[in-house]
Amino acid sequence: MPIAITRPVSDSLVRCELTHLARTPIDVERARAQHGAYERALAGLGCRIERLPAEHELPDAVFVEDTAIVLDELALIARPGAPSRRPEVPSAAEALARYRDLVHVEAPGTLDGGDVLRVGRTIYVGLSLRSNRAVVDQMADLLSPLGYAVLGVAVTGCLHLKSAVTQVAPETLLIQREWVAARQFGGMALIDVDPGEPYAANALLIGDSVIYAAAYPRTQARLEAHGIDVHAVDVSELAKAEGAVTCCSLILNDGAIGG
Ligand code: CIR
């Protein structure tokens, strides 16, 4: 059974980091209700939810994806590009240590988990405002011996690589070509976001289904036309904090060390 590590929405969410969006009022109670529905969607797809302790003084702590990369062989503990987010990392590392050996990103490397897209044995790392070339080199050194190819990918106009491209089926990516160059994903089938839904490229693949923001019905219809099973959730309040569906969990494909 997959494990989904999550963290409650912080009381201070309204003070979140923002890069591409203007600050607008966030209803924290509504964000909590949406986050609860998101956790129920994960549970409905067979995940066991493991909640990290709340970190109410850390506004972005709900976005646990950014604290680590979990592979079958190990967990790479991130060093988030925004210094305000680095205190989120130790509690996530403590939880992951129960399931995986840990390795750590070292300075000057910076990495947000939202910049990492793994497709089979290829790991794409977004070169964004948060993740840098130094971390690509570190990840290549760490992960090449395990049989992974690590590729840096330029990202412009959005926060993270996974704002621009995510996996939605074994050989299929959902992509926003304005923010990332499609040619780097040769060999994969590509589904474009609807032109009227520029933020629609973030989907969370769990087994054969995707959890997906309800805000993008036209792109959802494109996914469904490709036979993809879509579970839509309303994450509108989290989106005001520049969060999306992948950001709110760390998925472990099973619980066992070396599994
Ligand atoms: C931030 O700017 O760091 C948060 N407000 C949003 C992080 C979203 N995380 C993600 O897409 N992986």
Image (tube, rainbow, N blue to C red):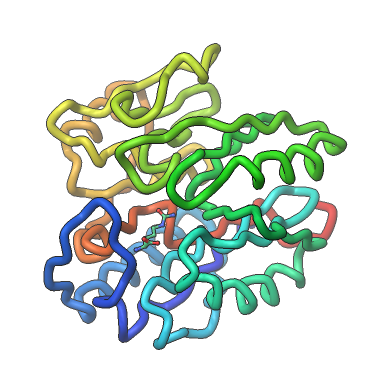
Which quarter shows the N terminus?
Answer: bottom right
- Can residue 32 be seen? no
Q: Nearer the viewer, residue 17 or 54?
A: 17
Number of disc labels: 0
Residue 3 x/y as whole percent:
60, 62
Ligand 1 falls in quadrant: bottom left
Drawn side of residue 151 relative to residue 245, left or right: right
Q: Is residue 96 above or below residue 73?
A: below
Q: Is residue 5 above or below residue 202?
A: below
Residue placed farthest to the front in the image? Answer: 108
Q: Residue at x 31, y 83 (%)?
A: 12
Residue 250 x/y as whole percent:
55, 59
Residue 255 x/y as whole percent:
72, 61
Q: Residue at x 47, y 33 (%)?
A: 167
Drawn side of residue 30 relative to residue 90, left or right: left
Q: Residue at x 46, y 14 (%)?
A: 183
